[in-house]
């Protein structure tokens, strides 16, 4: 009941924020700070939450056989769903061809993009941190997750006396972090009001943008919708033997937060809370799959990158062969794995795909204007897919769920 009330508060905050952003632009600074503060609060808890949840989760799993099985299932799910998302995007972009005849006068300069890209091999190597504390300070999620998994695993290998002490210690920290999360969640309506009002206020040529890039946006949104409302629910139903609609309802709060913040990482605390407490997935599966999913599993981003690349190719009049399209699919998958769970990370990764198939990086200028809007939708799909994965994996481990 309390959760439902919060959901309505958020929807109302959302609607009010749009009105405020449109009509009270000059007063935006009076409310924008609420969004900043809310995001800071969420970011503040990410590292301790991930550390304590993964370490306690893994220490509780116990033996290496179970851990390996969970790991293999999780990776299999990530790769399967991201590939399905990419294929959906590929089919739609070939049917609608949104880029053919698109106005290239629209191309803007993009600075600093070449610097931001990193090869996939380098991403893999960087998972092992040189200094784990620096990794935490710099928010290198994959490194922090890697360290936490190793630490949790070796807790299970030490003498029982210390093992109990350490598991108790991390379980206790994790409980505190969950309580703190719930406390921050209470402020979601204010946070979302601040974030959304600011975004609306800063986008003054919205209608013009929407009409010029309309078909491109339509294809991205349609493909995202098919993936989120058809493909993933079917997987939840068939493989997860659960009710996707009930699960969707359980996930309302994290999804609307993902939508407003455009950040899977910032949404993570809420995702973990909803999957565990509303959908009834065990803490072990939640804390293993979700932190990993927030950084690695990005179906929405993969799909978006593919459609964007194809759109740019079409706009430049380049006909990509089947072989090149396959390269786009594969690099799209890798780029989505490499993208961080923060706003506009997917945009940066497109440069990797563009260089892989030899398209000009300036093409990004074409899609820059509407990236922020599409980011909201793809982030919600990313979080939704993570949560569906948690449900399917929990079911396959024989858990009883609430959905
Ligand atoms: N904003 C997305 C996320 O956090 C990543 C992206 O830019 O596609 O999931």
Image: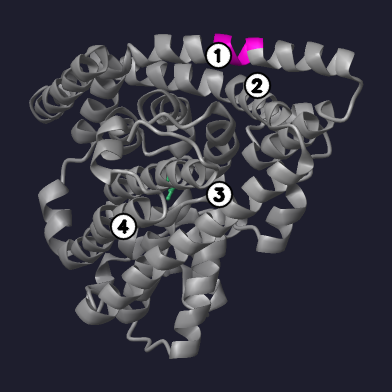
Query: Which label belongs to residue 234?
Result: 4
Which image quadrant: the N terminus?
Answer: top left
Residue where numbered disc 1 is placed: 177
Looking at the rendering, the stretch of residues picked out in magenta corresponds to 172-176
Q: Secondary structure at mark 1?
A: helix
Q: Residue at x 16, y 21 (%)?
A: 8
Task: Give the answer, above or below, for where 165 lies relative to 269.
Answer: above
Disc 4 to disc 3, how far (Cα)?
22 Å
Q: Residue at x 12, y 55 (%)?
A: 208
**CB within 8 Å, label 4 to label 3:** no
Task: Out of 147 and 358, give the one closest to the viewer.
Answer: 147
Q: Is residue 177 visible?
A: yes
Earlier-in-chain disc, 1 versus 3? 1
| Mark nearer the viewer, 2 or 3 | 2
Earlier-in-chain disc, 2 versus 3? 2
Q: Secondary structure at mark 3?
A: helix
Earlier-in-chain disc, 4 versus 3? 4
Earlier-in-chain disc, 1 versus 2? 2
Q: Main secondary structure of the magenta part?
A: helix
Mark 1 is surrounded, within 10 Å at the Cα level, by few (under 14), some (14 to 19) or many (20 or more) other residues, namely many
Find residue 279 and report its image quarter: top left
Mark 2 is surrounded, within 10 Å at the Cα level, by few (under 14), some (14 to 19) or many (20 or more) other residues, namely many
78 vs 14, left or right, is right
Query: Which label belongs to residue 52?
Result: 2
Q: Secondary structure at mark 4?
A: helix
Mark 4 is surrounded, within 10 Å at the Cα level, by few (under 14), some (14 to 19) or many (20 or more) other residues, namely some
């Amino acid at each position: 009941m309390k959760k439902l009330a919060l959901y309505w508060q958020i929807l109302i905050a959302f609607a009010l924020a749009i009105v405020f952003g449109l009509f009270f632009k000059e007063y935006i600074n009076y409310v924008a700070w609420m969004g900043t503060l809310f995001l800071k609060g969420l970011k503040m808890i990410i590292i301790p939450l991930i550390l304590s949840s993964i370490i306690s989760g893994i220490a509780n799993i116990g033996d290496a056989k179970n851990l390996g099985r969970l790991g293999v299932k999780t990776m299999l799910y990530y790769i399967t769903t991201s590939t399905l998302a990419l294929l959906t995007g590929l089919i739609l972009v070939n049917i609608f061809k949104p880029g053919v005849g698109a106005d290239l006068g629209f191309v803007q300069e993009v600075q600093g993009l070449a610097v931001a890209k990193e090869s996939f091999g380098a991403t893999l190597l960087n998972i092992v941190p040189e200094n784990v504390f620096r990794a935490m300070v710099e928010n290198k999620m994959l490194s922090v997750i890697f360290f936490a998994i190793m630490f949790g695993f070796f807790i299970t290998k030490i003498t029982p006396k210390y093992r109990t002490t350490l598991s108790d210690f991390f379980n206790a920290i994790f409980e505190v972090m969950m309580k703190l999360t719930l406390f921050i969640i209470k402020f979601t309506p204010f946070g979302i009001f601040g974030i959304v009002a600011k975004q609306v206020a800063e986008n003054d040529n919205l209608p013009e943008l929407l009409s010029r890039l309309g078909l491109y946006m339509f294809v991205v949104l349609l493909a995202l919708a098919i993936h989120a409302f058809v493909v993933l629910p079917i997987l939840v139903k068939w493989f997860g033997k659960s009710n996707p609609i009930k699960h969707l309802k359980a996930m309302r709060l994290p999804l609307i937060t993902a939508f407003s913040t455009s950040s899977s990482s910032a949404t993570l605390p809420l995702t973990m809370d909803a999957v565990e407490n509303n959908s009834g997935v065990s803490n072990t599966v939640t804390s293993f799959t979700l932190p990993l999913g927030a950084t690695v599993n990005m179906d929405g981003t993969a799909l978006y990158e593919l459609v964007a690349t194809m759109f740019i190719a079409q706009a430049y009049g380049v006909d990509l062969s089947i072989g090149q399209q396959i390269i786009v699919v594969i690099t799209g998958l890798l780029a989505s794995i490499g993208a961080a769970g923060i706003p506009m990370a997917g945009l940066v990764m497109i440069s990797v795909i563009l260089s892989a198939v030899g398209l000009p990086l300036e093409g990004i200028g074409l899609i820059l204007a509407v990236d922020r809007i599409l980011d909201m939708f793809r982030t919600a799909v990313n979080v939704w897919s993570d949560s569906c994965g948690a449900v399917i994996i929990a079911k396959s481990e024989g858990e009883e769920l609430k959905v």
